[in-house]
Amino acid sequence: MRGYLLGRLVSGIIVIFLALTAVFFMVRASGDPVLLFAPLDTSLEGIEAIRERMGFNDPLVVQYARFIGDAVQGDFGDSTRERRPAMEIVLERLPATLQLGGVALLISLTVGIPLGILSATRHGSGWDKLARVISVAGQAVPGFWLGLLLILFFSVRLNWLPTSGRGGFDHIILPSVTLAALSTARYARLTRSTMLDVLGQDYIRTAKAKGLGDRIILWRHALKNASVSLITLTGLEIGRLIEGAVVVEQVFAWPGMGRVTVQALLNRDFAVVMAAVVLFAAMYTIANLLADIAYGWANPQVRL
């Protein structure tokens, strides 16, 4: 198990390193980096001064080594708009994004998995058809459109919930439901297909022949063996929820990492953009690393 964990950890570090490398070269592939960082009305002398101050006159290898060294320490430069460290700005918004993603994941698990189990155990019934319709709709409806519909109905017409911002519990309901819609549909669909496959296995028929109750068969045998696929999906969905938060935070003016990243792009504040992109990549990698660890724990064969 120790070797398996070490291998997963090394893979995660390599992914984060590649993300740093991609950020470094993407900024330079889009043109002169100074023209991206500098305000539009900067003079030629000012551009040259910025180039010298930020080290863009140095050889590319030297720039890359300096960038990696600073990034490892969490230093991506100062925000051109707020005049303070870019990573500090992004980390201030991290709790809001984690709160939104955590609530959305909780909704996805508590709604999607039971819905998939109900669909599998009532195969061919009206419940099964309803669950499949919900799964298809959840994957087909764009998040930004669903968010606007929820605002129009629950906030504008019924005046039950606030339209935007972060505050009490009522503020997070609409954004989290919007963010969780796609994940809920995926959990329901995967749970249904996996449970149908597991319930058709020989050991399930043997358990029924021995007289075990339906609940024991369902929870101790079927769901336990189906959980391996659900663990894998959870690792992927955590990353997708972090990614999807960018759009949802814009729709609901939720003050998280996604919103500050979009604002930084509009303001040409690329130090904040780079810090956010790398932090997103690190969070995605850590989520998948934890899923791999849980996967190896649930299925010892994977460790081999």
Image (cartoon, rainbow, N blue to C red):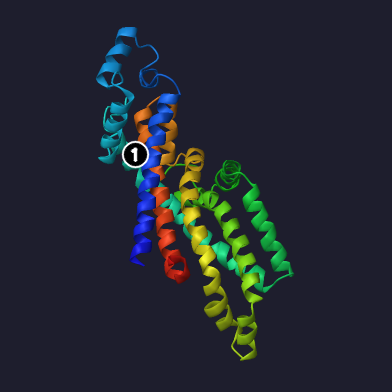
**Left-right relation of 162 to 81:** right
- Total marks drawn? 1
Q: Is residue 217 visible?
A: yes
Q: Is residue 256 visible?
A: no
Quarter of the image where the N terminus is located: bottom left
Q: Residue furthest front?
A: 304
Q: Residue furthest bottom?
A: 210
- Estimate the x, y position of residue 257 in percent, counting from the top left: 40, 41
| 49 relative to 212, above or below | above
Q: Amino acid at mark 1?
A: Val
Nearest the camera: 60 or 273?
60
- Estimate the x, y position of residue 76 in percent, counting from the top left: 30, 33
Quadrant of res 31: top left
Quadrant of res 125: bottom right
Residue drawn at the location 39% of the way across and 57% of the way down: 8
Other residues around mark 1 within 10 Å, as few (<14) / some (14–19) / many (≥20): many
**Left-right relation of 109 to 86:** right
| 225 relative to 250, above or below | below
**Left-right relation of 127 to 72:** right
- Estimate the x, y position of residue 183 in percent, counting from the top left: 55, 54
Which residue position is annotated with label 1? Answer: 90
| 284 relative to 27, above or below | below
Residue drawn at the location 44% of the way across and 26% of the way down: 266
Residue drawn at the location 67% of the way across and 54% of the way down: 136
Nearest the camera: 11 or 275?
11
Quarter of the image where the C terminus is located: bottom left
